[in-house]
Each structure stands twice: as C-alpha cells, then as structure tokens.
Amino acid sequence: MNKDDLFNTIEELVLHHSPSGVETQIDQYLLRRLQELGLEAWQDRAGNAIAKIPGQQAGAIAITAHKDEIGGIVKTVGNKGRLEVRQLGGAFPWVYGEGVVDLLGDKQTISGILSFGSRHVSHESPQKAQQENKPVLWQDVWVETKCTAAELAAAGIRPGTRMVIGKHRKRPIRLKDYIASYTLDNKASVAILLALAQQLKTPVVDTYLVASAKEEVGAIGALYFTQNQPLDALIALEICPLSSEYPILDGEAPVLLSQDGYGIYDEGLNGELRQAAAARDIPLQLAVITGFGSDASIAMKFGHVSRGACLSFPTQNTHGYEIAHLGAIANCISILEAYCLELGIGN
C-alpha cells in the first residue's frame, strides 16, 4: 500500500464515527470491506469485527487494532438545549477547544457547539479562572444545541449519548509524508489491518485480524475475544506517544514496546518481531512507556494470552490532533506480513 492509498484509507476510517460502545458506523464499513476481499468476516457479541485467514499448520495468532475512539458522553440534558458532558476515554475539553461536536442520538445525529463561555468577563464570572490559572475541565463546559427538549428527545439525545468531534473537523490533512488528524488512535492501525487483509494470503498459522471494540474504556472487546479464542500470540497495533521522556524518534521507524502501564510484553515474541523487521530491512525502535495500555498488555495481565506484543508508530499529540509518519504506518504492515508469512509462532 503506497502512502497515497494509505492516507486515503485512514481518511475514510476517520470519517466514520466510532465512540466507545457506539461503533456501528465503522462496523458496517469494516465488515463490507473484509467481505469484499473474500475473507470469512463476522462480528462477535462484544462488538469486535473479525476476519480469519486460514494458516498452513496448526496454531493461531491474532493481530488487533481497536476501532473505537475517545470522546464524550452526555451526563445531563438541561434546559434551553444545553447538555452536560463527561469524558469517554482519555478525552480533554481543552484539546478539542470550542467548536462543532456531533451527538450520536438513537434516531438522529445532531451537531452542537462545545462551549467554554465568553472571554470578555471579569472575576465575577467563573470562566475567568480558565484564562489565568485553571485548566478547562469537563464540568466547566457544555454543549450548546439550540434545540428544545422535545427536539432532543425526538432525536434520541439522552444521558449516555456519545459525543465526538464534528465530522468536518476530523478530516485529515497531509504534511508531506505525515498525516495529521484526530483519531489516528486507532484508525491508522485499523488501516494496517485492512492492508493485511488484502495482502496476507498464506500465513503460517491461522491469523485473526481483530478490529477490537471498546478498548478506550478497558479493552473490553479484546478481553472477550481472547477469553473465547485460544491463541498462541496476540500482537496489538497502536500509536506510540512522542515525548521528551521517551527515547523515541519521529519518522519512519516503528516502535516495539517492552513494557507499559499494565506490565511487560513477551520477550520471545518481541524477538520474533525484531527478526521480521530485520528480514525486511526496517529499523525498529524499542521503548518502555507509562500511562499507556494495549489490547495485548491488558489481555496478558488478565491471563487471557501467554504471549503478547505491541507494535506501534511514533505519534505526536496523542489523544489530540495527532501527527504520524505514513512511512512508519506502512512499515508496520511490512513487519507483520513478514512475521505471519515467514516466522509464524517461533518458526
């Protein structure tokens, strides 16, 4: 997959809303794409979208990329069309700023404005503190819809309704060989799954490509899948945060994690992935990071899989307007293809 095709695929994925637990838009798209490729594809009870590629010998691995995105959840439907919202996953209002958000009602999507209040005020107004010494918190903001209570009810807007960045604000842009967008975490990784679905024909062992559900709220989809499907290995695809505290360089080299906030990854499996990268002459960075978890580390922590790894691509502004090198994303595809076709599980 060249960089132009990769950008276009990620853009299409980003523009399908998928807040945790309300992932229907992306589900329909993914299942159609997978079935068009002639793969056995289905959705399980936890909401995971799964494709199976039969292997040449006994055994099974899974590669996961979570399809859900962070956002907000309606707490209260108030008077005069104002909604109180709280975070869904690791979302912060100051990252989104004031602007259009989409409310995914049961019957209709309604746009509103994430609002912080006027700036031309004195200390008599509570939002004055936000200009001087206080971060903007979810309890300080609201969504302005200008709808009546009856109109909101008719659209199915209620406590529990999901809020995401407005679709027109989510459209990615190209910065040379970089892509910049909301929700690269983890739509770019889902694009890697789709590339593997297209390219991977005869893996060593049965290979499950899993677009996992509700990862941002506890890896719920991956835990359900790994509890019900015996696996020899699980590889999670993820973003990797760029920060001065981590020895990770921006650019085309993917990152393989040794440890995150949930525990250590399997050294044997990491060694096999390093071999796969070397076979394709792809440089690979190694890192230990905190404040982070993946389908693989969480599944290992709960004893659902014995061997887990996390292959990722360096990303700026994680959980914000993210920026990643298309080459690093493409290199993840090559590494995993090499692993599945040539190395399998310890071969």
Image: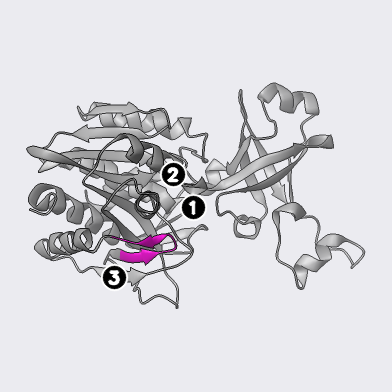
Amino acid at circle 1: Tyr
Other residues around mark 1 within 10 Å, as few (<14) / some (14–19) / many (≥20): many
Question: How far is mark 3 from mark 2, CA to CA?
Answer: 28 Å
Helix, strand or loop under label 2:
helix
5 w.r.t. 322: above or below: above
Mark toward the start of the polypeptide (3 vs 1): 1
In front here: 146 or 284? 284
Residue 34 position within the rendered picture, expressed as x and y whole percent measured from the top left: 27, 31
Residue 97 position within the rendered picture, expressed as x and y whole percent measured from the top left: 65, 56
Residue hosting label 2: 14
Amino acid at circle 3: Leu
Question: How far is mark 2 from mark 1, CA to CA?
Answer: 8 Å
149 w.r.t. 230: above or below: above
Residue 201 appears in the picture as rendered: no
Other residues around mark 3 within 10 Å, as few (<14) / some (14–19) / many (≥20): some
Q: Residue at x 53, y 48 (%)?
A: 70
Mark toward the start of the polypeptide (2 vs 1): 2
Helix, strand or loop under label 3:
strand
Residue hosting label 3: 286
Q: Residue at x 21, y 48 (%)?
A: 1
The span shown in magenta is 257-265
Proximity of marks 2 and 1: CB atoms separated by less than 8 Å: yes
Residue hosting label 1: 182
